[in-house]
Image (tube, grey):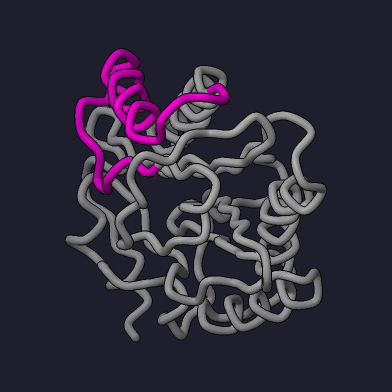
Amino acid sequence: MDMQLLEKTGPNFSHDALMMARKNTKDAIALIARSIAPGMLEEDARMMAKETLERLGSTKGWHKILVRFGPNTVKNFEDPSERGVKLQTDDLFFIDIGPVWGDTEGDGGETFVVGAGDPDMKRCAEDTKRIFHIVRKQWASTGMTGKELYDFAFRTAADMGWILNMELTGHRLSEFPHSAYYDGTLAAVSIRPSANLWVLEVQVKHPSKIIGGFYEDLLLDDAEY
C-alpha cells in the first residue's frame, strides 16, 4: 500500500480544525448522553441526537447517527436496531456520531450506564475505553501496522473477557469526505498509521450476555488526552 495515498489530505485540511472537530464531537456526545434517561425510546433518542447536532452547528454527518440501547448494543454498525426498545432503569447505551463541522469530519463514540446496572454493564463501559488506550499506547510505542493493531486489540479484548467486533475496525478521518482518499478500514492497512489521521474503533460484546459497548477516538499522542 502506498502510504502517501492512504494518508493524503486536501488543501483545506488543518490540524487545528481537526482538533476543534474532535472537541465539538466530544462535547456533543456528552450533551446527548445527559439528555437520555430511562423510559426513553431509542428512536426518540436518535432524533434528539440529530436535533442536538443541528443546534450545535453540524447539519450533516459523514455517517449515520447511532444511539443503541440495551439489546441493540451488540448489533453491528450496519444492522438495524430492534424497534421500540426503551432504556431500562438499570441499563447501558452507546452513542456513535460522525458529524461534519465546517468542512472537517468529527467522529466519536462512548458507552454509558444508567442506574445500578449489571456489574458487567459498568465493566463493559469502562473496558471499551481501557482497550482503546491499551491499543493506542501499543501504537505509540511500536511500529505496528493497522492489521497488527487490530490483531492485538482482539487478543486484548479476549484477555479481558470480551469479544471484539472485527467488522468494525477503524478508518481514516480528514476534511470531508475522507473517502476521497481512502474508504477502507484501519485493520486493512499494512502501514504504521500516523497520528491525526486515523480513528481507532473498539466495539465489544459479552460472550454470553446481551451486553455490548463501543468507544472510538482519533489515534493521537499522549499529550492530546
Judge whether residue 31 is colored magenta. no
Quadrant location, the C terminus: top right
Residue 198, picture quadrant: bottom left
Residue 160, picture quadrant: bottom right
Quadrant location, the N terminus: bottom left
Q: Which one is nearer the viewer's eye here, 215 or 116?
A: 116
Q: Could you tell me residue 124's position as x and y percent?
A: 71, 53
Residue pictured at 30% horizontal, 62% vertical: 78
Judge whether residue 61 is colored magenta. yes
Residue pictured at 44% horizontal, 68% vertical: 168
Q: Could you tell me residue 174's position as x and y percent?
A: 32, 50
Q: Is residue 137 left or right of residue 80?
A: right
Q: Is residue 210 left or right of residue 65?
A: right
When the figure is inspected, residue 134 is found, relative to residue 71, above or below; the finding is below
Residue pictured at 63% horizontal, 37% vertical: 112
Q: Is residue 70 left or right of residue 134?
A: left
Q: Which residues lie in the magenta part?
A: 37-66
When the figure is inspected, residue 176 is found, relative to residue 21, above or below; the finding is below
Q: Could you tell me residue 148's position as x and y percent?
A: 59, 83
Residue pictured at 77% horizontal, 53% vertical: 120
As drawn, the residue found furthest toward the left would be: 180
Residue 202 visible in the picture: yes
Q: Is residue 210 left or right of residue 5?
A: right
